[in-house]
Image (tube, helix red, strand yellow):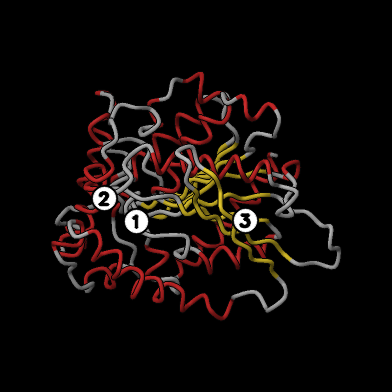
């Protein structure tokens, strides 16, 4: 298959992946225990390399707001905006949706990264704390995230944003999937008759289709990325890699979404819907079970005439940049991320 060469492990990452300790079989079963582990160990681990890059005190506004949702409840959003000489300055808006398979992680996961991004690129950034499955199955994560996007559009002036300077919806992994669907939802929503629609979508390592919903013509392609990401010829033969594969594909069991619903499998939206989408930036990892779903989404956007930029990272697994940020390919990933946002802003 044309993309299988992308699964050959990156020379710098290969040895690191080989010696990762295996995760417990209960990692994807005991959700409460896993969430506690992520909060206690994983988030501090990924934050530590970022600590020295945090914006100096007084250079960033950070505030939290409660966003009303349809069932009468509220969700939390955290807003970041630069402090500059002009107190009335406004900035492009990025609404960021965290990953975690709709089951794990929180607004805290990307907090340091979003602080740095807001300061470095002079953006207003809104991080979204959507409610998680299995307690809140599909479409709750989507509906909550969409409510936050609409809230941010309506409150732009309050949070020092200007939609005319750019309005990006983005996220990583599950957050990228939610962002892709939100872009489709927004172009048909009368709400956006009164506000500017998103002008860009940032899809970082996205899963764009449930594995059980693949069209027959795409099934072989997508299965190749799943097989090559755990082939014995790669470092994915290790126990930790097998756990990782299980994690990637167990999430639908917790989320309980209908596989063929385009809102859960946005690759299935009709071409006419794609033609109305804003510009897109996509990052795809070569050693990732969802690699080909990202590639297929890129192709469908491109065929629909949407301005789209794709960066591929051969031989890297899903989310590698969080675990090994000092590797050269992770540094490239982070640099490309910033260039990708600039690309989207240039289309707005």
In the displayed structure, does residue 278 sit left or right of residue 98?
Answer: right
Residue 126 horizontal/vertical position (percent): 59, 54
Residue 3 to residue 246: above or below: above
Marks 1 and 2, the one that precedes in the sequence: 2
Label 2 packing within 10 angstroms: few (<14), some (14-19), many (20+): many
Q: Disc 3 on helix, strand or loop? A: strand
- The one of 336 and 61 positioned closer to us in this rendering: 61
Mark 1 touches mark 3? (CB < 8 Å): no
- The one of 283 and 50 positioned closer to us in this rendering: 50
The residue tagged 2 is 248
In the displayed structure, does residue 206 sit left or right of residue 29?
Answer: right
The residue tagged 1 is 318
In the displayed structure, does residue 59 sit left or right of residue 4?
Answer: right
Quarter in which the C terminus is drawn: top right
Mark 1 touches mark 2? (CB < 8 Å): yes
Per the model, the C-alpha gap separating discs 2 and 3 is 27 Å
Residue 101 horizontal/vertical position (percent): 33, 50
Q: Residue at x 24, y 46 (%)?
A: 254
Q: Residue pushed farthest bottom?
A: 52
Quarter in which the N terminus is drawn: top left
Q: Nearer the viewer, mark 1 or mark 3?
A: 3
Residue 16 horizontal/vertical position (percent): 29, 72
Q: Residue at x 72, y 76 (%)?
A: 58
Q: Which label number is shown at residue 125?
A: 3
Q: Disc 2 on helix, strand or loop? A: helix
Q: Disc 1 on helix, strand or loop? A: loop
């Amino acid at each position: 298959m044309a993309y299988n060469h992308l699964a050959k492990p990156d020379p710098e990452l290969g040895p690191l992946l080989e010696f990762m300790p295996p995760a417990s079989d209960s990692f994807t079963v005991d959700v409460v225990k896993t969430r506690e582990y992520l909060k206690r160990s994983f988030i501090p681990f990924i934050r530590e390399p970022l600590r020295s890059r945090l914006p100096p005190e007084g250079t960033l506004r950070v505030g939290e707001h409660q966003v009303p949702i349809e069932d009468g409840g509220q969700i939390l959003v955290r807003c970041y905006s630069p402090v500059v000489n002009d107190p009335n300055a406004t900035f492009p808006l990025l609404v960021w949706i965290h990953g975690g398979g709709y089951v794990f992680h929180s607004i805290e996961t990307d907090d340091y990264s979003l602080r740095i991004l807001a300061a470095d690129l002079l953006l207003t950034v809104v991080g979204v704390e959507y409610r998680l499955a299995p307690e809140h199955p599909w479409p709750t994560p989507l509906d909550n995230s969409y409510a936050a996007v609409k809230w941010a559009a309506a409150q732009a002036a309050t949070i020092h944003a200007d939609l005319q300077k750019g309005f990006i919806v983005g996220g990583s992994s599950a957050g990228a999937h939610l962002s892709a669907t939100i872009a489709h939802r927004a172009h048909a929503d009368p709400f956006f008759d009164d506000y500017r629609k998103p002008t860009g979508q940032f899809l970082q390592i996205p899963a764009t289709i449930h594995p059980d919903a693949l069209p027959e013509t795409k099934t072989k392609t997508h299965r190749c990325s799943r097989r090559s990401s755990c082939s014995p010829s790669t470092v994915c033969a290790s126990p930790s890699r097998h756990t990782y594969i299980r994690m990637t594909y167990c999430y639908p069991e917790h989320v309980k979404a209908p596989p063929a619903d385009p809102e859960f499998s946005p690759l299935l939206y009709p071409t006419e819907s794609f033609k109305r989408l804003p510009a897109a930036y996509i990052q795809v990892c070569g050693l990732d079970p969802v690699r080909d779903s990202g590639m297929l989404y890129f192709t469908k956007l491109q065929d629909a005439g949407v301005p789209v930029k794709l960066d591929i990272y051969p031989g890297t697994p899903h989310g590698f940049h969080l675990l090994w940020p000092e590797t050269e390919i992770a540094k490239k990933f982070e640099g490309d991320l910033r260039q990708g946002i600039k690309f989207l802003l240039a289309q707005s």
